[in-house]
Amino acid sequence: MFEGGCVCGEIRYQMVSRPMFVHCCHCSSCQRESGSAFVINALIEADRVKILQGSPEIIDTPTASGKDQKIARCPECHIAVWSNYSKGGKNINFIRVGTLDDPNQIPPDIHIFTSTKLSWVTLPSATPAAAEFYSAREIWPQESLSRARANAVK
């Protein structure tokens, strides 16, 4: 199990299993939204995320694709703890790995949107990278694909 939360401690959550997959996203939208060079998201079924304390505020946020994302933020310190995107809907949370108590436990499985990564960021050669996005069927482990299918938006 993995625990995390916001900066002020108002929101605490627990992931009750490993995520299905972990993206390190280098798109310019993630750079702007996070104020950083990239964002690392752990994709996990929403029912495998238990809120231990507090109640996140859900904020509709526009994306470059034109499909909104819903960002769960602490109502006090406004830190983003996870997002829900249109494809996964409310069934799949994209946990911000940096909000975990020990982010070292969950390294990226892939670097995405590397076509817009900052020039001074060096990617590890052992981790797959995609200029834009990728096909989950080609990259994800079979167990993760099965988990994702079981939680597909209906």
Image (cartoon, rainbow, N blue to C red):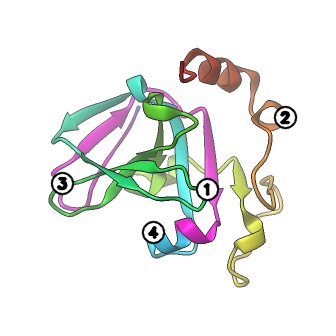
Bounds of the magenta span?
Answer: 2-30
Q: Is residue 27 magenta?
A: yes
**Label 4 sits on residue:** 34
In the rendering, at what x and y percent does residue 95 appear? 45, 45
Q: Which of the two labelled residues, at mark 1 and mark 4, occupies the earlier sequence position?
A: 4
Circle 1 SS class: loop
**Disc 3 secondary structure class:** loop
Which of discs 2 and 3 lies nearer the camera? The answer is 2
Q: Nearer the viewer, residue 30 or 108?
A: 30
Q: Which residue is mark 1?
A: 65
Q: Position of residue 23 (x, y in %)?
A: 63, 50
Mark 1 and mark 4: Cα distance apart in space: 17 Å
Which of label 1 and label 4 is nearer to you? 1
Q: Is residue 109 left or right of residue 56?
A: right
- Residue at 54%, 49% (x, y): give it: 67
In the rendered structure, which disc, 3 or 1, sits on the residue that comes first in sequence? 3
Q: Disc 1 or 2, which lies upstream in sequence?
A: 1
Q: Is residue 129 visible?
A: yes
Nearer-N-terminus badge (4/3): 3
- Point out the frontmost of discs 4 and 3: 4
Q: Which residue is mark 3?
A: 9
Corner quadrant of residue 119:
bottom right
- Residue 35 appears at what percent x and percent y? 45, 76
Q: Is residue 114 left or right of residue 82?
A: right
Q: Is residue 7 left or right of residue 25?
A: left
Q: CA distance from mark 1 to mark 2?
A: 22 Å
Mark pair 4, 3: CA separation: 19 Å
Residue located at (71% from left, 57% from top): 112
What residue type is disc 4 on? Ser
Name the amino acid type tagged 3: Gly
